[in-house]
Image: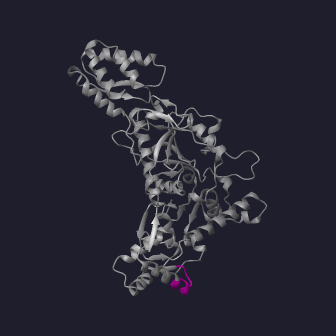
Amino acid sequence: ACIEKGAKTHEIPIWWFILQLILEALALKLGREVLSKEEAIHVSDSLGFPEGELDAALTFFDKLNIFLYKKTILPEVVFTNAQVPLDKLSKLVEKQYHLKAAMVDRTKAADHAITGDWHKFRDNGILTLDFLEDSKNHYVEGIFTARDFLVLLEKSLVVSRLSRTEYFFPAILNMTTEEKISECLETCSRTKIAALVVEFPTGWAPPGVYCCSVCHLQSHSGWEVVENRRIKPQSKASAATHTSSGLKEDKLPLPPPSKGSSASHSSLSRNCIKFDKIDRPGSVTFIDKFSSFVVCVNVDTSKMQGDQLSEHCQAIKSEILAAVGAALKNTHHEDTHATTAFLCPQQDESCSTELHVARLSSNKKQWICSKNKEVFDSFTPDQILWLSTSGAGGGSSGESAPAMSVLANRVAAVIPDKWKKVAVQFELSRGEIRAIQKDEDDSFDRFMAVMDHWKQSLSKPFTWATLVSALQSLSVNETRLADELNREFC
């Protein structure tokens, strides 16, 4: 049999399809859509399958969404219906729908009977093993249990573990409106760190990638959802009377509900989540614009400057791109690679529904507006913080931009012998130059005097041309440095 996939045609052994029919017939006979690997092996042996071919066939049908077989997650389970996990998840969605309906109508006694765990599930997307055990359909003792289902969800980046008994399920959260997302982006634009945009070549984020990325950030990068961390353990007595109004809305990353709202709600949403890390200052708001993702960093820049701030942003960028890369692989989009861009400063009313970005040019020294193709000759200090140094933070984007440490090394390489001890580093976050190591020679003092004059008179963002212009005002003996820099960067 031949299967067309894209521009290629693959020949598939006909006995693979015979295996499919027999396994489906066996599942129908047994009255369940879950088989053990041992049962599948028994069928493949009767068909004379060579060793290892059963796994290849099951993996093939998994990619076609006919079967569900995850060798690295649940190697002993074969779902003859790939919709089984979705069917079980739909039960949770249905339950949450009824919980939210009861919340809107506070007169319903059912809402007051909901335990604290169900409130956390409704408002914060937190589920426990007990929730999954309530739905008995598709479970087969000794083959597929509720705990196996949790393993499948966790390893597939559908949920992430919060504690020994609790799991975070971001896909089940409410959606934040476009208006509130715009308010959040406007708030982020007032910080001293530019918002980073994660784009996809298709112009649209593949389905499921955002929520999988969120779970990866929690499970593998140690990020914590701010709102979930605020929830304190409760006794069973207090849990029964706990309501969503117990969440403190004055600390939320998004504005609280408007006055007159029928019910309070959590800051968490399906498309906007605020993260925190205990070992790292500030917070990160991760936003799904569906066409792309936006990363907003809020940190006290008075306590973190220069290299520290740059390394902080690059670490965040690296972890975000690693999470997105893992999510793309998990959702069978291995050929899709995320790239980064910046929010364009020339936003207007037409950008309320369409994200307006500026992308790095091919030479990585300019950025180009995606809307009117305007070219910006330089990066602003808050954008420079995201640029990679020595490959750090590059993730899957493969970017290579002029960086502070690279420039410092090249400047040191062309400085005359009498300046060999001098290493110049550009603190682009403040648009200034400082000396890391000072030579006794007065040439360096004259060099820094020119830099100080340039810094004081600077009225526009830093550019390589501005630096060269300042260097060329030195005496003729130092023009070699200016010429070298001009060839390297302009």
* Residues drawn in magenta: 25-33
> For the view shown, which residue lies furthest in the left direction?
417
Q: Nearer the viewer, residue 109 or 334?
A: 334
**Quadrant location, the C terminus:** top left
**Relative to 106, residue 376 above or below:** above
**Relative to 48, residue 284 above or below:** above
The reply to whether residue 74 is in sight is: no
Q: Nearer the viewer, residue 153 or 121?
A: 153
Principal secondary structure, stretch drawn in magenta:
helix
Q: Position of residue 267 (x, y in %)?
A: 62, 49
**Relative to 312, residue 32 above or below:** below
Colouring mode (rainbow / by chain / secondary structure / one colour): one colour
Q: Does the magenta-highlighted stretch encompass residue 27?
A: yes
Q: Quadrant of residue 188?
A: top right
Q: Does the magenta-highlighted stretch encompass residue 162?
A: no
Is 109 positioned to the left or the right of 392 in the image? right
Q: Position of residue 158 (x, y in %)?
A: 52, 61
Q: Residue at x 72, y 63 (%)?
A: 111
**Relative to 431, residue 224 above or below:** below
Q: Quadrant of residue 134?
A: bottom right
**Quadrant location, the N terminus:** bottom left
Q: Quadrant of residue 443?
A: top left
Q: Residue at x 30, y 16 (%)?
A: 445
The reply to whether residue 432 is in sight is: yes
Is 76 positioned to the left or the right of 423 in the image? right
Q: Position of residue 403 (x, y in %)?
A: 37, 34
> For the view shown, which residue lies furthest in the top direction?
475
Q: Position of residue 333 (x, y in %)?
A: 46, 58
